[in-house]
Image (cartoon, rainbow, N blue to C red):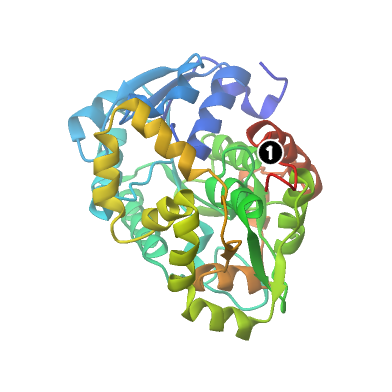
Amino acid sequence: MTGDSRFSAYADRTVLITGATGFIGGRIAERLALDHGAHVRALVRSFGRAARLARLPVELTYGELGDPASLSAAVKGCDVVIHAAFDWRADANNLAGITNLAEACLAHGVRRMVHMSTMAVYGTLPPGDFDEASLDTPFTAYAKSKVTLEQHLGTFVGERGLPAVVLQPTIVYGPFSLPWTDQPVRRLLAGKLVLPEDPQGLCNAVYVDDVVDASLLAGLATDAIGERFLISGPDWPTWQAMFESYAQVLGVDGPVLLPAAEIRRRNRTAGLTALRHSIHNPGELIRTLAKSTLRAPLMALYRRLPQGKQAGIRRLYTSRPSGGPVPVFLPNAQLFNLYTNLARARIDKARQVLGYTPRFPAERGLAMTAEYIRWAYPCRDKAAA
């Protein structure tokens, strides 16, 4: 175990983690089990996705967010529950899941429930500082769902005394971060990643281990119940600086800067361009289909394939173009808003109430992420890209 006294109370406590097969939940499980001596119980829907967990001294227990019986069994005997799961397939499952989980926590006398939300609930903010008092203005379906879940959990806190805390991480990067590390890296390797030229937006970046620290502190802080906390890093690098650091590790060209008007013009013909690229690059075709309205039926078909066929599709998914035009990855409307945003998340409340002190300024967090990139993407010379 590590010598961090802030988390010594977790020794021998039982902690249930939902979403433990994912990015943030998996790292929480790893830290609790290996560094802090906790008994970790991981709620798992698909054991085939639990490879990272299987190497850890954790208890894997089957459960579904929509199944009250399995959630109740998983919660029984737990001191703390950290809810990091989110069902992208069916939003109704998320509301049912947080309801079932809250009921189970009340029934079994859990000391603390920590719910993982997101900075996205605040939508597109004006330049300058923002905090938890800012108005919720979600503009994506994901963010709207997260607002609903926060509000629903609040009724359990106010009306039934559920000892719950809400965390709102910002842009969480680091090893295994699909949207903010792996996807940009794959795009830098495969083609040209485009950023708006002006303004060069600020990234409210937070390294994954800082989010883990905040999660564990939220499970202990006496004055945190019923509150929500923005969780971000200690500084605000530009998006260009973030992606340039990835490119330097990979040995490829960094992001391309284009005027906003040019990005909008190109986006109007992006569908046809993507189709042309896909003809020469099966991996790009798979990635395009994975983001389309066909995602759900295609995923159902994929899961019925033999393991060998699934592995082949995964190799194609990460493959690079074999010919034809170099792919150009333009930001969609949501990313464009992020890449040009000049808002800065304030974490004063988390500092004061949780005792949260981020340990990873961007320079250190990106250096840690660089080690992951070197391990996960060993073939990274310019010629191969």
Q: Is residue 168 left or right of residue 110?
A: right
Q: Is residue 167 left or right of residue 207?
A: left
From the image, tell me which residue sits under label 1: 373
Residue at image position (68%, 81%) is: 259
Q: Quadrant of the N terminus?
A: top right
For this rendering, which residue is in front, 107 or 346? Answer: 346
Which residue does the image show at 18% across and 29% down from the upper left? 69
Q: How far across and down, in percent of the image, does residue 319 sit?
A: 54, 44
Q: Is residue 25 among what the camera can see?
A: yes
- Find numbered disc 1 in the image and state the secondary structure of the residue it sits on: helix
Q: Which quadrant of the view contains residue 235?
A: bottom right
Camera-nearest residue between 265 and 79: 265
Q: Position of residue 107 (x, y in %)?
A: 25, 32
Instruction: Name the residue nearer the viewer: 285 or 75.
Output: 285
Disc 1 marks a residue whose amino acid type is Ile
Relative image position of residue 284 (x, y in whole percent): 48, 54
Is 338 on the left or on the right of 285, as rendered?
Answer: right
Q: Is residue 136 above or below residue 383?
A: below
- Is residue 166 shown left or right of residue 186? left
Image coordinates of residue 209 in percent, x first then y, are 64, 37
Query: For the view shown, which residue lies furthest in the front direction?
Result: 323
Which residue: 68% across, 33% down? 378
Who's the residue at 51% across and 38% down the image?
23
For this rendering, which residue is in front, 203 or 289? 289
Residue 83 seen: no
Q: In the rendered picture of this protein, how many numbered marks are placed on residues?
A: 1
